[in-house]
Image: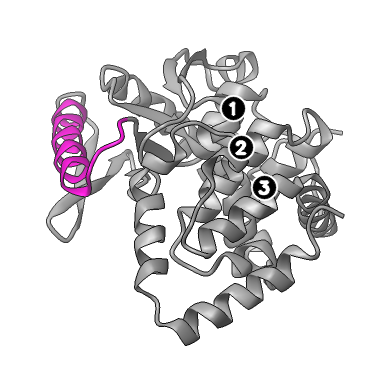
Amino acid sequence: MTPPIDRDSICFKKAQLVLKVLPFLDEEKDFALYGGTAINFFVREMPRFSVDIDLTYLHIADWDTVDNETTAMMLRLRKRLLNAGINATIMPSEDAARGITAEKDGIGIKIETNFVLTGNLFPTDRRELCDTAQSVLEMYVEINVLALPELYGGKICAAVVRQHPRDLFDTKLLLENEGIDDQTRKSFIVNVISQVRPMSNLLDPDFINIEVDYTSAFKGMALEYVTLDDLLTARKNLLRTLRKGMTAEERSFLLSLQNRTPEWSLLGLSGAHDLPAVKVRLQRIEAMKEKGHREETEKLVDCLKLWGC
């Protein structure tokens, strides 16, 4: 049973503003859409509203280049939005502009870039707004979107790290439909090795209490009935599926990287070693003192005993 759509709700109006803003991003060919908006508006038939815009820079480049290109893009976007009657305010981050707050008629959304994960390993997809969104929100948009393995590899990592109801909902539908294929799992691994925190923390996370987020930041967003228990079950199923699916080669790859001698052929995903965030991870491991490195490695070894079985 589908809940009635409240066209006066904040979620509905934010979703409309998201779609009003997206066409102004379409000419920015060095960036692509990812995250919940890409999944729920362009891959699936709008199982939930999405209320922000996440972008990623597509080229493999150093941080200064990414900063400069992102800042230039945000300034261009701000000018277009202002010319269209949409208020746009740059959200500064140190010396770079990595986000914009767009506002119209009292409704605001955020447009942000992912500074950690830059560069794509698969060709992007050109996608049309899904039929349901076209009908309900009465708009049409085309946009460049990250490929499915990278979309869901990032979404799975977000679900493991943040455990926000939105991310758990998106991964719940993935498990119920396509499942986690090899390329998606490998993309998830790339996300894991792109984070600063120890890999064992990501592969064996402590469960977070999501009840407040479910009530305050998720209810009213989904266009199907989803209980808190549904999302808690989805969280357990996600980790169980990831653990069963990880191959011996992938586990060996993670250990080789932690041991400062990454065997990239074991991962089986071309180009991962060139990603800036991965290079930062390797630099961090190289710089660790032996005691800290040994302890972190032991935790990873213990953690990986749970994976692949």
In this view, the residue in front, 263 or 287, is 263
Image quadrant occupied by the N terminus:
top right
Mark 2–mark 3 Cα distance, whole angstroms, equals 18 Å
Report crowding for label 3: few under 14, some 14 to 19, many 20 or more residues within 10 A (C-alpha).
Answer: many
Q: Position of residue 195 (x, y in %)?
A: 46, 59
Task: Look at 64% across and 58% down and name the residue there.
Answer: 160
Q: Position of residue 213 (x, y in %)?
A: 62, 63
Report crowding for label 1: few under 14, some 14 to 19, many 20 or more residues within 10 A (C-alpha).
Answer: many
Q: Does the segment drawn in magenta span residue 247?
A: no
Task: Look at 41% across and 39% down and name the residue there.
Answer: 54
Q: Is residue 210 left or right of residue 99?
A: right
Task: Look at 29% across and 20% down and name the residue there.
Answer: 29
Q: Magenta residues: mostly which secondary structure? A: helix
Residue range highlighted in magenta = 59-82
Residue matched to label 3: 250
Residue matched to label 1: 148
Mark 3–mark 1 Cα distance, whole angstroms, equals 20 Å
Report crowding for label 2: few under 14, some 14 to 19, many 20 or more residues within 10 A (C-alpha).
Answer: many
Q: Is residue 66 left or right of residue 133?
A: left
Q: Does the segment drawn in magenta span residue 76?
A: yes
Q: Is residue 76 left or right of residue 298?
A: left
Please say whether residue 141 is visible from this viewpoint. Answer: yes
Q: Amino acid at mark 2?
A: Tyr
In this view, the residue in front, 304 or 58, is 304
Residue matched to label 2: 152
Q: Quadrant of residue 210?
A: bottom right
Please say whether residue 219 is visible from this viewpoint. Answer: no
